[in-house]
Amino acid sequence: MQGKSVNILGIETSCDETAAAVVADGRIVGSSVIASQTKLHEKYGGVVPEIASRAHIEKIYPVIAEAMEQAKVGKDDIDAIAVANQPGLTIALVVGVTAAKTLSFAWDKPLIAINHLHAHLQSAMLTEENLQLPAVALIVSGGHTCLYNCESPLELELLGSTIDDAAGEAFDKVANILRLPYPGGPSIEKAAKNGDPKAIDFPRSMLGRDSLDFSFSGIKTAVLYYCCGQDMKGENKVDSMSKEEIADIAASFQAAVIDVLVRKTQRAAERIGAKTILLGGGVAANNELRTTLQQMCNSAEPPKKLLIAPKQYCTDNAVMVASLAYHKFEAKLFADLTLEPKATG
Ligand code: KG4
Ligand code: ZN
């Protein structure tokens, strides 16, 4: 990975993955190293910020060293250091931001600040050489659910977002109710395979005819009422339910969430006359969502091209950070050493 290519070291610590990657020219992946904290948070049924931060501190330099080694690059081969500095858990982000600033200072390389959500979107474009614009991007993760009008990798207009829970958060909370292991998304998907998606008619919140916003707290509550009774006085019946009944709840919940995500994406695509749909974020790993969105794109008039992030780059990783940073590098959009982490973004 030498010569004229632009090699960027990407760093990601926004939630519960410590990740580093080296990417050349925004699309040639030299390495991608991810230290997942799933085991540490599993018993709490969600991410504990203090534990996440400490684990990032422990892992950040070994992960960066491993990424450099796997890509067979030394500091002289690196053209810039990129880091996700927003949005996320501030005490998690600060670890990556501090590491990136330290390397930028010590190695005298430009520093590039990356929005984690915009980076998720970049994962969907990773292998595409000829992006047809305008494009609508659906980013579905544990913390966010957003629709963007994508005019270029660096020009994103937010069209809508969740007004309460994110889609991934709903998967995680419903998995908790169903006593399925953390993280909830993959567990629900696995359980749903054996269930009937039409068994229970869970609500689909569309928030009015024109809205491009999302709301997933209603469906989460509907699952809770279904399992514990409307007055919440009953025991959680899940303990005495058969595997088939749990599978039906998981499949019906998954179908309702996907239905809303796909219909809103279609609505956004019609509004801006999109030629392409981009899908990224942790929930984009869900096969049902991938297939249903593909069907929508095929049956649209005219049909739309669907670009989905490769599975290994749906959940948090640093390839997406280094890849988006390439566009900022070319545009000379650099940060300085006062860069701070930001919870929102
Ligand atoms: O993008 P991500 O790794 O982290 C955030 O930026 O939040 O997304 C994590 C989320 C979790 O809520 C997880 O349950 C969900 O993505 N997820 C899935 C699947 N794999 C991960 N949701 C549904 N189906 C999946 N297969
Ligand atoms: Zn993410």
Image (cartoon, grey):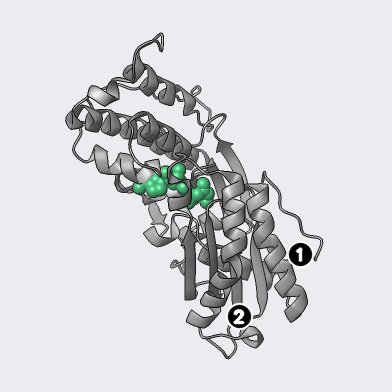
Q: Residue at x 34, y 46 (%)?
A: 186
Q: Looking at the picture, tell me which residue is in the foreground, 109 or 51.
A: 51
Distance from disc 1 to disc 2, alpha carbons, whole Å, reads 18 Å
Which residue is depicted at the point 52% across and 76% down? 66
Per the image, the residue denoted by label 2 is: 6
Q: Residue at (69%, 61%) from the top-left corner?
A: 97
Q: Nearer the viewer, residue 79 or 264?
A: 79
Graded by Cα atoms within 10 Å as few (under 14), some (14 to 19) or many (20 or more), the crowding at tag 2 reads: some
Query: Above or below — where is 72 with respect to 90?
Result: below
Residue 339: quadrant of the picture: bottom right
Q: Earlier in the sequence, mark 1 or mark 2?
A: 2
Q: Is residue 242 above or below residue 47?
A: above
Q: Is 192 in front, or is 44?
A: 44
Question: On the picture, is 266 further left or further right than 58?
Answer: left
Measured along the vertical axis of the image, is residue 261 above or below residue 224?
Answer: below
SS at badge 2: loop
Which amino acid, by three-letter code, is at mark 1? Answer: Ala
Q: In the image, residue 54 lies at what x, y percent?
A: 61, 55
Q: Tell me what residue is drawn at x 82 percent, y 61 percent.
A: 338
Mark 1 in CB contact with mark 2 (< 8 angstroms): no
Residue type, mark 2 in image: Val
Indicate left or right for 47 with 339 as reference.
left
Number of numbered discs on residues: 2
Q: Position of residue 73 (x, y in %)?
A: 56, 85
Q: Nearer the observer, disc 1 or disc 2?
A: 1
- Residue bearing mark 1: 335
Quarter of image, res 175: top left
